[in-house]
Amino acid sequence: MDLANYFPILLFILVGIAVGIVPMFLGKVLAPSRPDAEKLSSYECGFEAFEDARMKFDVRYYLVAILFILFDLETAFLFPWGVALRDIGWEGYVSMVVFLFVFIVGFVYIWKKGALDWE
């Protein structure tokens, strides 16, 4: 068994590591670093980033985020359906109407349960 057969694998690993590390290194070296209060402030997370990691926070924030992802993924199915509507015929149309019905029932359910209310 010749070790030269493993050279492409080693080369692949080294190139993969370089593609991951070199841009980060170049960004650190070449990018201007002028942090100010606005850059270091909270961004989308809802709480200060430099406080104790064990602090309590509202779970509803994550519930809304999960529901957003869920409904966003469900609506992502609408685009390919609309593009292929002529090809899938009535069977595809009816199946999407059933899908949308289940989608709307789920949305009304979480709305009535108060999962979207933010107090």
Image: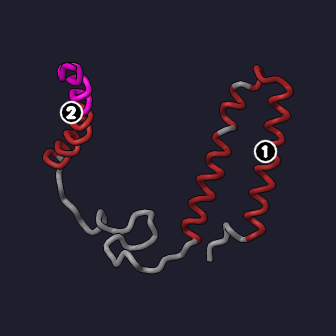
Please tell me the numbered disc located at residue 14.
Answer: 2
Within the image, what quadrant is residue 1 found in? top left
Q: Earlier in the sequence, mark 1 or mark 2?
A: 2
Report crowding for label 1: few under 14, some 14 to 19, many 20 or more residues within 10 A (C-alpha). Answer: some
- Magenta stretch: give its range: 1-13
Question: On the picture, is 89 further left or further right than 68?
Answer: right
Name the spot of residue 47 as percent of width and height, x first: 42, 73
**Mark 1 — residue?**
100
Can residue 9 be found in the magenta stretch?
Answer: yes
What is the tally of numbered marks visible in this picture? 2
The residue that appears at 19% across and 39% down in the rendered structure is 22
Q: Helix or strand or loop: what does disc 2 sit on?
A: helix
Going by the numbered disc 2, the residue's amino acid type is Leu
Please tell me the numbered disc located at residue 76.
Answer: none
As drawn, the residue found furthest toward the left would be 29
Within the image, what quadrant is residue 8 found in? top left
